[in-house]
Amino acid sequence: MTFNRDVAAALGFLAFSIAYGWQATGIDLFPGQEYEPFTPQTFPLALAVAGGVLALLQLVKSLRAQPEAGDSWARYDWTRVGLLLVTMVVYGATFTWLGFIVATTLFLVAGYLILGERRPLVIGAASVGVSVGFWAIMTRLLGLYLAPGELFRGWLW
């Protein structure tokens, strides 16, 4: 068995999926909600299971594959990886204050810029479209409440 980047990625994703599923079991339910077919825990647990299954499939595939010559970790752009991780931490820290739509839009804009996209129309349309679309699905279709953010709370009440 060789430990290469595919095995490392599969193990990392498996660990993330397990941790995500474990945290999802701690989502509070309203009284009587545990008997409903769809609760706030349902989708996160489904994502955790799907992620775990995909990680296990990738792990099996990676362990069965022949090792590639010259598989080096040095060829990756670790600066971009670090910037994306910092961006994720900032997104999590500002989410409550800015609200879902603004924080997610800024996070996606920063991610596109870090990954090399430079067309303003593509960056803006994709960021706003994904943020507003996902917000509409969560709030209008699924009926979940997403707080507008502390910054905008005074303007909306």
Image: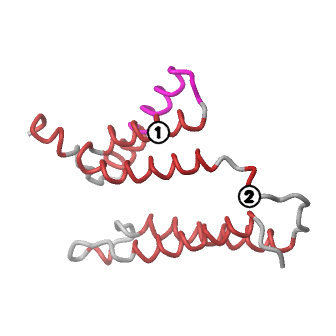
Q: Indicate the position of residue 49 as horizontal and vertical percent values.
A: 56, 72
Image side of residue 29 versus residue 141, left or right? left
Tell me the element at label 1: helix
Q: Nearer the viewer, residue 87 or 38?
A: 87
Residue found at x 42% / y 32%: 128
Tell me the element at label 2: helix
Residue 152 highlighted magenta (yes or no): no
Q: Which residues are magenta?
A: 117-132
Q: Quadrant where the N terminus lies?
A: bottom right
In the rendered structure, which amino acid carries the disc numbered 1? Leu
Is tag 1's residue or tag 2's residue first in the polypeptide sequence?
Answer: 2
> Which numbered marker is on residue 18?
none
> Which numbered marker is on residue 108?
1
Q: How many marks?
A: 2
In the rendered structure, which amino acid carries the disc numbered 2? Trp
Residue found at x 56% / y 74%: 15
- Vertical relation: 150 (above or below) 25: above
Q: Quadrant where the C terminus lies?
A: top left
Mark 1 or mark 2, whichever is nearer to me = 2
Q: Nearer the viewer, residue 44 or 19?
A: 19
Residue found at x 32% / y 77%: 35
Image side of residue 154 versus residue 113, left or right? left
Q: Nearer the viewer, residue 4 or 30?
A: 4
Q: Indicate the position of residue 90 as horizontal and vertical percent values.
A: 37, 49
Mark 1 and mark 2: Cα distance apart in space: 26 Å
Model colouring = secondary structure
Q: Indicate the position of residue 74 as horizontal and vertical percent values.
A: 74, 54
Label 2, on which residue? 73
Q: Indicate the position of residue 41 as horizontal and vertical percent values.
A: 38, 70
Image side of residue 67 versus residue 107, left or right? right
Tell me which secondary structure the magenta stretch mostly adopts: helix
